[in-house]
Image (cartoon, rainbow, N blue to C red):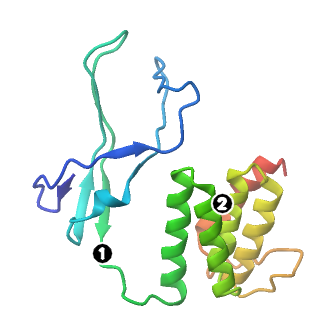
Amino acid sequence: MTDAAGAGVAKATFVVAGKPSAGALALGPDAITTLVMRMEPEGWAGIAPGRYRIVAKLELADGKGWRGTAEAEPVEVAVVEAPPDPKGEALGRRQLMRVNDALLAADLPRAEAAMRDMISADLKRPEGFVAMALIAEAKGQFGLAVTAIDLAIARAAGGDPKAKVPATDAKTAPVEYYDLRRRFAEQAGE
């Protein structure tokens, strides 16, 4: 992890999100392997606000097969001070990040609790329904995921959430909601 000037800031420790299916990470020849990692919340403690660059590095020094070092493409991140009392969209984004973090940590009860808090706090905001869709996907309930993301799109676009056809105003509903809808619909076999 380096700062904007390229100075080394910290060796951040990340953990694998989820569990590789075979219990170990398998790197096949001529194959692309995707690994999702997350930093535990304690890992961010003490990192000052600013822009950072994170590069994941895999080093295999022993074992069978390939040995060497591989580096991922760098990822730029901005660490910012949390607003003291977020409202509306800022609060929704923060809560949605909490849901995503819980899902990456395979902590479904924490994700569901955050989703319920979001929906009960403001039923008109779309983020609670995005959270509901992500949780439904994690449970394999792809039809429910499609329905929930349709509700999120309708709310974000200012449409009628009870309408049978979701709002299609991509100028007001975030594009990533439509990407999620396509992913859920494919999983649901639509």
Work out whether residue 146 can be spotted. yes
Position of 13 compared to 136: left or right? left
Which residue ends up furthest to the right in the rendered image? 164
Q: Residues within 10 Å of mark 2 (few under 14, many from 20)?
A: many
Position of 108 compared to 146: left or right? left
159 w.r.t. 10: above or below: below
Which quadrant of the structure image shows residue 103?
A: bottom right
What is the secondary structure assignment of the residue under circle 2?
helix
For the point 67% across and 59% down, the residue is: 135
For the point 21% across and 65% down, the residue is: 46
Work out whether residue 168 can be spotted. no
What is the secondary structure assignment of the residue under circle 1?
loop
**x then y, percent, for residue 185:** 78, 54
166 w.r.t. 112: above or below: below
For the point 31% across and 42% down, the residue is: 56
Name the residue that disc number 2 marks.
134
User: Which amino acid is tagged 1?
Assistant: Val
**x then y, percent, for residue 139:** 72, 51
> How far apart are labels 1 and 2 at the CA level?
25 Å
**x then y, percent, for residue 162:** 86, 82
Is residue 140 or residue 189 the one in the foreground?
Answer: 140
Position of 169 compared to 7: left or right? right
Position of 40 compared to 30: left or right? left
Circle 1/circle 2 CB separation < 8 Å: no
User: Which amino acid is tagged 2?
Assistant: Leu
Name the residue that disc number 1 marks.
80
15 w.r.t. 30: above or below: below
